[in-house]
Image (spheres, rainbow, N blue to C red):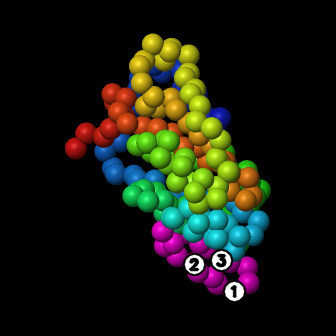
Amino acid sequence: MDSTDVGASTSSATPEVGTIDMKLEVVTIPVSDVDRAKSFYQSLGWRLDADFSAGDKLRGVQFTPPHSQCSIHFGKGLTAAQPGSAERLLLAVDDIDAARADLIRRGVDVSEVYESRPPGFESIEGRSYFTYASFSDPDGNGWLLQEVTTRIPGREWED
């Protein structure tokens, strides 16, 4: 089966939701200079989880944003993706203005806060899910702050 086969079925049946816990643990981002990237992510106040190497061809660095369940990896020999090619890496925040101010205080160039609503969501009140600010790491990997204060129904797993 190749990737075009996925979802190509004409059946209208919806598969049942999986019951095995699968938590997104780490996202690998491509960088050109490992030490420069390490310095940048440390400056954000993110927790350094690991910095390991195996000879000259492999080095991995892992950081976790404050209170996140998912981390990032970057390094040498981890991915064939081009440095700076990661886009729309989303950081959900409770208060986008405070998060933006914190990043600016840390020397990060952050966009102004802006609103973006997909078609059909114009009538929903509030900023939750629709308010963003953006910034990039030194390689150009693109990050979005997204204010999420109230979850949309169906966006939380039942216990």
**Which residue is denoted by mark 3 in the rendering?**
59
Which part of the image, by quadrant, shows the N terminus? top right
Q: Amino acid at mark 3?
A: Arg
Horizontal and vertical percent position of residue 111: 65, 41
**Which residue is denoted by mark 2 in the rendering?**
51
- The residue range painted magenta reads 47-62
Horizontal and vertical percent position of residue 6: 57, 35
Give the crowd class for mark 3: few <14, some 14-19, many >=20 residues within 10 Å: some
- Would residue 17 be found to the left or right of residue 109 on screen? left
Most extreme residue toward the left is 159
Asked if the residue under mark 1 is in contact with the one under mark 2, i.e. CB atoms within 8 Å, the reply is no
Disc number placed over residue 109 in the picture, else none:
none
Horizontal and vertical percent position of residue 21: 34, 51
Considering depth in this image, is 87 or 114 the residue closer to the camera?
114
Give the crowd class for mark 1: few <14, some 14-19, many >=20 residues within 10 Å: few
- 50 in magenta: yes
Disc number placed over residue 55 in the picture, else none:
1
Q: CA distance from mark 2 to mark 3?
A: 7 Å
The image quarter in which residue 157 lies = top left
The kind of secondary structure element at disc 3 is strand
Asked if the residue under mark 1 is in contact with the one under mark 3, i.e. CB atoms within 8 Å, the reply is no
Please say whether residue 101 is visible from this viewpoint: yes
Q: Amino acid at mark 2?
A: Asp
Considering depth in this image, is 72 or 95 the residue closer to the camera?
95
Considering depth in this image, is 29 or 133 the residue closer to the camera?
133
Q: Amino acid at mark 1?
A: Gly
Give the crowd class for mark 2: few <14, some 14-19, many >=20 residues within 10 Å: some
Instruction: Considering the whole magenta stretch, tell me its main secondary structure.
Output: strand
Asked if the residue under mark 3 is in contact with the one under mark 2, i.e. CB atoms within 8 Å, the reply is yes
Q: Earlier in the sequence, mark 2 or mark 3?
A: 2
- 39 in magenta: no
Please say if 58 is above or below 71: below
